[in-house]
């Protein structure tokens, strides 16, 4: 099975309107920049996006919000995007804001084939509304369900032609668990190398989770928020 594609445009050939897409990254670190840009160009709309955050106004998922391609965001942090705020307050965008640990575990559970789990996060808050509650060791826990997604968009540092992946630094955030969770996982890498080049002991995501892979280009090293003294 040939998993290698020429570019992002070819790799997302079957992404359709109203699909649910997981997007790796944390802030602006390790986000699938090429895949997001290709999705903007393709114009698929009515999307549900699952991501730690919603990018910024002119970068990341913020580009999809700007073109009104997203109907719902499932995130844990959305504080850096003015357009996101405007669409939320105007009722144009549905938002499911959930605890970051719950977001991570719903991704991990999906990849592990676990349909649901209990967590104490959100007990006694609006998050608990209409959710099943059980008591374990005299503490309340909420029932949360694993995510279901049509695609996972992932960014890695290096990958080989089979789809074995290595992440670098903080980019090893939501990317590995989303790679395992997507029904179809599409990966962009900074460097695509021949099979057998990567040390098996250093592989973070095995090839079994990857359906498509390509070498990205024109990556920007942005700083989301600079603090200086």
Image (spheres, helix red, strand yellow):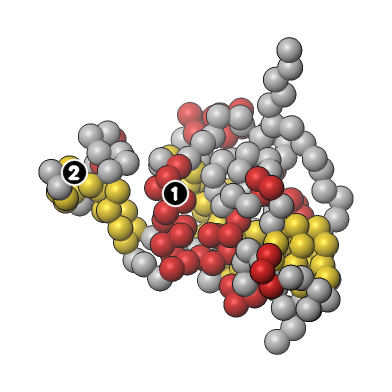
Element marked by disc 2: strand
Quarter of the figure with the C terminus = top right
Residue sitting farthest toward the right: 218
Identified at 36% across, 67% down, the residue is: 114
Q: Nearer the viewer, residue 154 or 166?
A: 166
Vertical order, 177 against 28 (above or below): below
Residue sitting farthest toward the bottom: 1
Q: Tell me whether the residue at label 2 lies in contact with that at label 1, contact meaning CB atoms closer than 8 angstroms.
A: no
Q: Position of residue 106 (x, y in %)?
A: 41, 56
Name which of mark 2 and mark 1 comes first in the sequence.
1
Identified at 32% across, 61% down, the residue is: 116
Q: Is residue 49 left or right of residue 170?
A: left
Identified at 52% across, 51% down, the residue is: 50
Residue sitting farthest toward the top: 229
Identified at 78% across, 78% down, the residue is: 196
Q: Position of residue 160 (x, y in %)?
A: 77, 72
| Label number found at residue 140 | 2
Element marked by disc 1: helix
Q: Position of residue 91 (x, y in %)?
A: 46, 35
Quarter of the figure with the N terminus = bottom right
Q: Position of residue 79 (x, y in %)?
A: 55, 29
| Label number found at residue 157 | none
Whether residue 228 is visible: yes
Q: Is residue 45 left or right of residue 3?
A: left
| Label number found at residue 103 | 1
* Dot 2 alpha-carbon crowd within 10 angstroms: few under 14, some 14 to 19, many 20 or more: some
Q: Is residue 127 left or right of residue 172?
A: left
Residue sitting farthest toward the front: 201
């Amino acid at each position: 099975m040939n998993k290698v594609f020429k570019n992002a445009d070819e790799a997302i050939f079957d992404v359709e309107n109203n699909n649910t897409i997981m997007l790796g990254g944390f802030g602006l670190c390790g986000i699938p920049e090429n895949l997001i840009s290709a999705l903007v160009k393709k114009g698929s709309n009515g999307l549900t996006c699952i991501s730690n955050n919603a990018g910024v106004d002119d970068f990341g998922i913020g580009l999809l919000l700007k073109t009104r391609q997203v109907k719902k965001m499932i995130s844990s942090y959305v504080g850096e995007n003015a357009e996101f705020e405007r669409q939320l307050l105007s009722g144009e965008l549905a938002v499911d804001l959930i605890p970051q640990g719950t977001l991570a575990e719903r991704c991990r559970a999906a990849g592990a084939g676990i349909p649901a789990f209990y967590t104490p996060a959100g007990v006694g808050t609006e998050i608990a509304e209409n959710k099943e509650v059980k008591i374990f060791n005299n503490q309340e826990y909420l029932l949360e369900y694993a995510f279901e997604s049509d695609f996972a968009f992932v960014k890695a540092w290096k990958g080989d032609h089979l789809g074995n992946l290595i992440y670098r630094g903080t980019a090893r955030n939501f990317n590995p668990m989303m790679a395992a969770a997507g029904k179809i996982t599409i990966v962009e890498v900074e460097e695509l190398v021949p099979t057998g080049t990567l040390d098996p002991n250093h592989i973070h995501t095995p090839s079994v989770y990857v359906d498509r892979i390509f070498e990205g280009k024109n990556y920007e090293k942005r700083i989301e928020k600079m603090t200086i003294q």
